[in-house]
Amino acid sequence: MKNILRVDSSLFLEQGVSSGLMDELVGYLQGKYEKNRLVRRDLAAEMIPHLNGEWIQALMADEKERDQDQKNKVEYSDKIVAELEEANIIVLALPMYNFSVPSVVKAWFDHIARAGRTFKYTSDGPEGLLTNKKVYLVTTRGGLHKGKDSDTQIPFVLNFLKFVGLDDVEIIYAEGLNMGGDFRQQGIEEARTSIRSIMSA
């Protein structure tokens, strides 16, 4: 049994290019693992809450002293972390907005980074606790950024994932989507080819 966690983040929801590529990738994964359980979280559709001072206070408060609002906040964050803990495979959509990830992805990361739960501090530095999981990143870009200084997105995401123990990562790129001409279709086809290649390995 493989538990697959699909995390979408396109502001265009089902019409986003990343959503379509995620459909294709998850379809391959479900076909590859006959016994599987799919959990889907759409960060843009549900508008995942961004952390604020009240949320941080709720997470830091003693469990016995939390009021009902604080309990609700902690329960929400706990559920997000539990989805990751239970997953064997994580598929994350990363459309590039203004050279970075969608703000809802950053908010998701903030809920995930939990000392003692997803990472711990040791004498040798932080140690990620979400180990032995496979991650697939599907990134869509209007321009061409792969391997360039302008790609400030993927280094940030890889650094965060490694921080919580997720270091087995495959990346699917779809670039040039807003450049006109044949660039858009070429970028999508290259991403689909990459998906098929990864799934056949």
Image (cartoon, helix red, strand yellow):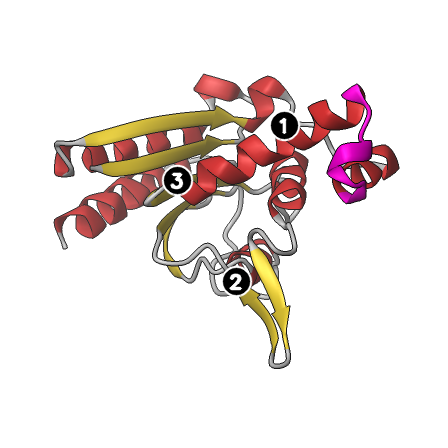
Residue 90 falls left or right of residue 10: left
Q: Mark 1 points at which residue?
A: 76
Residue drawn at x 74%, y 33% is: 50
Q: How many C-alpha atoms fall within 10 Å of the one at disc 1: few (<14), some, or many (≥20)?
A: some
Circle nearer the N terminus (3, 1):
1
Q: Mark 2 points at which residue?
A: 128
Return the x and y of residue 60 as percentages of the image width and height: 78, 44
Circle nearer the N terminus (2, 3):
3
Q: Name the residue under label 3.
A: 86
Query: Helix, strand, or loop for circle 3?
Result: helix
Front residue of 200 and 59 = 59
Residue drawn at x 64%, y 80% is: 123
In this view, 100 is above or below 182 = below
Residue that lies at the very extreme toward the right in this rendered image: 53
Question: For the residue marked with disc 1, what is the amino acid?
Answer: Tyr
Where on the picture, by quarter, is residue 106?
Answer: top right
Front residue of 117 and 103 = 117
Q: How many C-alpha atoms fall within 10 Å of the one at disc 2: few (<14), some, or many (≥20)?
A: many
Residue 44 falls left or right of residue 23: right
Magenta span covers which residues?
60-68
Q: Does residue 139 appear in this view?
A: no
What's the CA distance linking mark 2 and mark 3? 15 Å
